[in-house]
Image: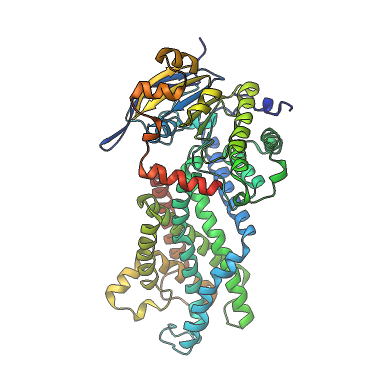
Amino acid sequence: MSAPTADFRAGSAEPALGTLTARFGRLRNGAAAMGWAELRKLRHDQIDIVTRSVQPLLWLFIFGTALRRNRALAGGYHDYRAYLAPGVMAQAALFIAIFFGLAVIWERDVGQLQRLLATPIPRIAIVLGKATGAGIRALAQALVLLAVLAATGIAIHWNPLKILGALVLLVLATGAFACLSMILASLVRTRERFMGIGQLVMMPLFFASSALYPLSIMPRWLQLLARVNPLTYEVHGMRQLLLGISSGGTLWIDYAFVTLFLAATATIAAKTYPRAIL
Amino acid sequence: MSEAAVLVDNLVVRFDEVEAVRGVSFAIEPGEVFGLLGPNGAGKTTIVRVLTTLLRPTQGRAQVAGHDCVREGLAVRQLIGYVPQAISIDGSLTAWENLEFYGRVTGVPRKERRERIEQAVDAMTLAPFLGRLGRTLSGGMLRRLEIATALLNRPQVLFLDEPTVGLDPTARRNVWERLELLGREAGTTLLVTTHQMEEAERQCQRIAILDLGELVAQGSPEQLRTQFAVPSLEDVFTAATGRTIEEGGSFRNVRANRRLSRRLG
């Protein structure tokens, strides 16, 4: 056999660079690589998006249709299905995000996490890359839902800029919830336990938000909870953009709240993530 | 004397009450194939985790190519390749995508990436499997693919944690042939952990034997046999510890090994 390994001369690795530019470059490249891998996985498993879309469609067409004429639930809007659509999109993305932590535990068990943590990419790039992955999946799923809304004639504002704005908010929030999930995964040892905790976190987030009903019909104590729930701001912002309805508060507050939540969860996840391998 | 490729000095790693590594010291010369031997639970993987910057030692010093593993973690990670015991290939990506991914995350410049991937593919004879998803590859192919991904950044030191566990004899021989070539022709320093004494005897230039976190003997296979006046390394272990190598290993180790063997088919 020839000598193919001669090209791997030891010692020819790039020197360690600690400049700000180099650090930013590693962060950008690392997060981009993680996002690229998620896109590739999605390409190999397109059926996953279809199967994941079933649940939000059930919410929309069974739950939404049953309560279609209920104007109180729809905050005065004429069609509850349209009112529900942003909430269902956000809820489906929340499901994707929360169970991203399961992937972290799986990756630890199969050695992928150890391997990644031994590469030069910063921890925060791994976390942001994973968050991007969750965001990409949520985006693909949202596009399927938007297509279904268009096909079934459920009226939303079909303004491309507003739709883009809503999708950006969805991706940011999904990334943030994926980071929250990674924090939980780093604290939990087994997949079974994570499943329990995931449900425990997800259900209150979902029901104590404006995903299904407006804040105005909630009792005072639940309103207080909903007002500190990032899902409320995500859904509120999406509803403003897709339906033009608001229950108070401006759009920039929704973006700011979700972005701050993402910054906080990503920072904490980057600190706790390496603990997952112990 | 040249700077050691790997230096471990009085290393201690404690997990709460358990002392997994107890004052271990050894040095590996550049280009050397060095084996860390011992039963499951001896502390081999813990030492590798310290050297790959995954774990902070409780006490002592660990260096790779002159860089401290705690203070200069990034510099260390830029100079090493690491193949963990469990299969780290992403089964949802093809072999080529795995190579591309690790090329990206180990900082291989975009212009050189394709060439280095081609070299790694040649070195590990992966060309026929590049388009196949990781989960469809056999155990031997997976290990070779893993090693290929670990070569892309041209590491000075390659850490291989039980690289042949779960493989059949043919696949095992194949992996070792590739590693031998790598050490001989590229001058890469190899640190290999194993509990297979025969394999270590045949492939490693020097060996450190660990038991319950302590280093009980080190030297070339021949030196060790002479020192303990026994015919094989397995007997060296018994002579040094009073036990056989099969007695080690926790429930977690056994479960992990079985899961890995199942995954490797």
| Residue B12, horizontal then vertical, whole percent | 33, 27
Q: Residue furthest front?
A: B231
Compared to A181, does B78 lie above or below? Answer: above
Compared to A176, does B233 lie above or below? Answer: above
Residue at the image position 38 percent from the left and 58 percent from the top: A192
Left or right side of B14 for B47: right
| Residue B218, horizontal then vertical, whole percent | 42, 18
Q: Residue furthest left?
A: B17
Residue at the image position 45 percent from the left and 60 percent from the top: A99
Q: Would residue B152 be seen by someone viewing this image from the given angle?
A: no
Of residues A131 and A242, which is closer to you in this image?
A: A131
Q: Would residue B213 be seen by someone viewing this image from the given angle?
A: yes
Compared to A117, does B220 lie above or below? Answer: above
Quarter of the image that includes the C terminus of chain A = top left
Quarter assignment of residue A156: bottom right
Residue at the image position 63 percent from the left and 30 percent from the top: B178
| Residue B173, horizontal then vertical, whole percent | 61, 32
| Residue B89, horizontal then vertical, whole percent | 56, 45
Compared to A152, does B89 lie above or below? Answer: above
Q: Residue furthest top?
A: B1
Left or right side of B134 for B111: right
Quarter assignment of residue B30: top right
Figure label count: 0
Q: How is the image coloured?
A: rainbow
Q: Residue furthest right?
A: A2
Quarter of the image that includes the N terminus of chain A = top right
